[in-house]
Image (tube, coloured by chain):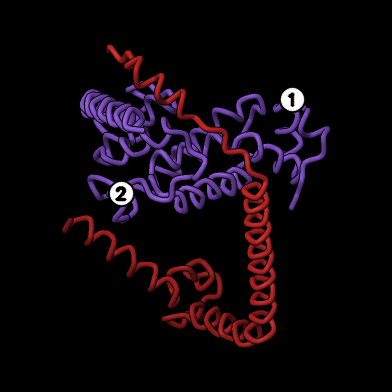
Amino acid sequence: MNWERDPMLEAAFAEAEGDLLDDQFTAAVMARIQRRQRRVIAGRIAIVVAVIAFELLLSAPLQTTVAALTQALGTALVEMENEWLAIALGPLNSVAGLIGLGLLGLQFLYRRLV
Amino acid sequence: MPVAPDHYAEGPEALVVSLALRGDRTAFSELVRRRQSWIRNLMRRCCGDATLAEDLSQQVFVQAWRKMRQLKDPARFGGWIKRLAVNVWLQHQRKADPLAKADEIEQARGLRGDATAVEMDLDRALARLPSSARTCIILSYYVRMTHPEIAEATELKPGTVKSHIRRGAERLRELLSAYAESDGDAERAV
């Protein structure tokens, strides 16, 4: 590919390259960087405060909810007298197992339809 | 106002860059001092608006400070910051910016009082080019990028870049010749 530059325009660009040295510009850039860093630090502090507040306010209700969910998901669907059979079929014979199977069924149907 | 001490001002750029990479702000301010002229000239040529050009130039250095760790080789700082400046301009242009969409900038605004006649003529002529052609011409003649590099940076087809540069250069030559003639007439009249 031929991409020679026009000598007249090259000369014009070279001649027009003025020296824009200015200490105020440097000071403005550094002030902007400092402002940005202050904002970043303030943002990080806000995140830490939010995490601590979340921990203090919501950790106890969350733990209760998780415990209740765990218990509910493990509930057997059919009561079995044989203890070993109950343990072996535990993953399927539970609310969690039912939800899991339901999701697998939905995924299978989706693949068949799409 | 941070003033770089003499030992920074006299130090080789790779060394100053290495110091800036370690978080030395004084070293970075020295890099700003050294590179500002090229970047501010680029932005002035591109947007023809002194205030916007100053803002975009400052953005270049703020981004440079933020992304310094991406620079693997301090000796390549010059090329790296030039590419960063071009990207800042192109990103600005891609945003829904009425200035970028306008085919012509009505006139180069806010020109410096100390600008030479050649600078003023060039800025006036560039301002009259369509925005894509202006960008391609500046990237070719000022940033010294090749056509394939311009095509990659601007996301234009290589053929489009070539045609923008060819037509833009023709128009720029015409305008500069006309300005030179009118300047000559004015001088003779005086």
Q: Residue at x 44, y 28 (%)?
A: B143
Q: In this image, B187 relative to B165: left or right?
A: right
Q: Residue at x 35, y 67 (%)?
A: A101
Q: Residue at x 24, y 40 (%)?
A: B130
- The three-letter code of the residue at mark 2 reads Ala
A47 to B122, vertically: above or below? below
Residue B119 image label? none
- Label 2 Cα crowd, 10 Å radius (few <14 / some 14-19 / many 20+): some
In the figure, the red chain has which letter?
A
Q: Depth check: A57 or A106 in front?
A: A57
A1 to B93, vertically: above or below? above
Q: Quadrant of the C terminus of chain B?
A: top left
Residue B12 image label? 1
State which chain disc 1 sits on: B
- Label 1 Cα crowd, 10 Å radius (few <14 / some 14-19 / many 20+): few
Q: Position of residue B16 (x, y in %)?
A: 74, 32
Q: Tell which residue pokes out farthest to the front in this image.
A: B190
Mark toward the start of the polypeptide (2 vs 1): 1
Q: Label 2: which residue?
A: B100
Q: Depth check: A114 or A23 in front?
A: A23
Q: In this image, B115 relative to B166: left or right?
A: right
State which chain disc 2 sits on: B
Q: Position of residue B15 (x, y in %)?
A: 75, 28
In the figure, the purple chain has which letter?
B
Q: Depth check: B2 or B149 in front?
A: B2
Q: Residue at x 45, y 49 (%)?
A: B50
- The three-letter code of the residue at mark 1 reads Pro
Which structural element holds mark 2? helix
Where is residue B186, by image quadrant? Answer: top left
Q: Is residue B162 visible?
A: no
